[in-house]
Image (spheres, helix red, strand yellow):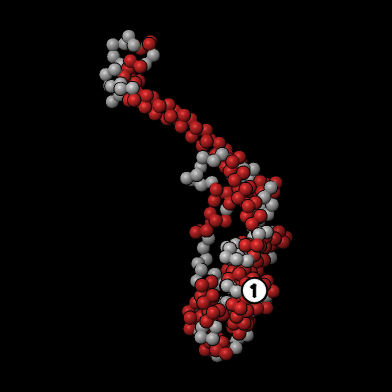
Amino acid sequence: MGEIYERMDDMLGEIKDVMKENAYSSYYPEVEKIVVDRWDKMTIPVHCLGFALNPRFYHKIYLDKLAPAGLARKAPNEDVEVVRGVMDTFTKIAKNDEEDKLLREKFTRFHTKKGIYSMVATQANSVTMDAIYWWSSYEAETRELAEVAKKVLSQPISSSSAERNWSTYSYIHNDKRNRLNSKRSDKLVFIHSNIRLLSQFSEDYKSGPYKKWDVQKVGHESGKCVCGRFKRKIGKHGMGKFGIQRERKKSKGGRYLESRLGLVLWFLKYVFSSGYTYRNIWYIVPEAYRNEPTPPNRIHLT
């Protein structure tokens, strides 16, 4: 978790290095805008906290090494965006104002290298040791901050387990709940997203036991406006043109199969509930077939 923010910063520089001697170098501003927009959409304050709690990013060896594109590196506490994200996260995870204040004080002690963090061995190990082990070794003076750091830095860098939570449409329409038509799915997505938007104006959203539930406000995934722009962002029916065609084919095929299967089940239910047996079942068929010496093959039961 602690390296996501740094990798994203380096990505822009690496792209610039690749494109500056390329025939498409004039397109770099557009590429940069795409990357920045994507980062603004996916970043959350916890990413800033993970970056700020990694001791390696404060060491002289890291700061003296130029970043891609020849940019000078700076410590996390010197980045306004990072500091703002750290403070927002402390406020959200703290149980009360006193704990929030304590975490901020411990963080200041950590990044200013006071006490145990001023030791040569402590600073040297920040480069060679894993960040989680480093906090476990030097947590004596900032136990509260160390507990937060170990929980944040131990988060795996993977989105596979949370993909469905980020997609309102996938949350409503899935393989097991696939009989929703496109119009009803649109309505459910619209209602779900707007209920979450309305909940942000309640007192429980800002205070109380539910204030920690949302790490980022609604709007970034569903189109920022859950009305006309929403449909334009994820497709007319939330699936795109080809998704709509597939859904229609599936729904038509499903209805055809259900109607035929229902007819067969009704027929069997009528037969067995009426007491017909194998030998006289053919007498319920139309009169045109009743003169046949043997039951027609198409209703012969095996």
* Residue 19: % across, % down: 67, 63
Image position of 175 (left or right of 91)? left
Which residue is denoted by mark 1 in the rendering? 87
Residue 291 position by quadrant: top left
Residue appearing at x 57%, y 49% in the figure: 169
Whether residue 34 is situated above or below residue 9 in the rendered picture? above
> Does the image show residue 18?
no
Q: Nearer the viewer, residue 189 or 294?
A: 189
Residue 266 position by quadrant: top left
Image position of 196 (left or right of 1)? right
Q: Amino acid at mark 1?
A: Met
> Does the image show residue 278?
yes
Find numbered disc 1 in the image and state the secondary structure of the residue it sits on.
helix
* Residue 177: % across, % down: 50, 44
Q: Nearer the viewer, residue 62 or 177?
A: 177
* Numbered circles on residues, count: 1
Whether residue 55 is situated above or below residue 166 in the rendered picture? below
Residue appearing at x 51%, y 37% in the figure: 250
Q: Quadrant of the C terminus?
A: top left
* Residue 124: % across, % down: 53, 86
Residue appearing at x 65%, y 62% in the figure: 203
Question: Tag 1: Cα neighbours inside 10 Å, few (<14), some, or many (≥20)?
Answer: some
Q: Quadrant of the N terminus?
A: bottom right
* Residue 95: % across, % down: 57, 72
Residue 212 position by quadrant: bottom right
Q: Nearer the viewer, residue 275 or 298?
A: 275
Image position of 158 (left or right of 14)? left
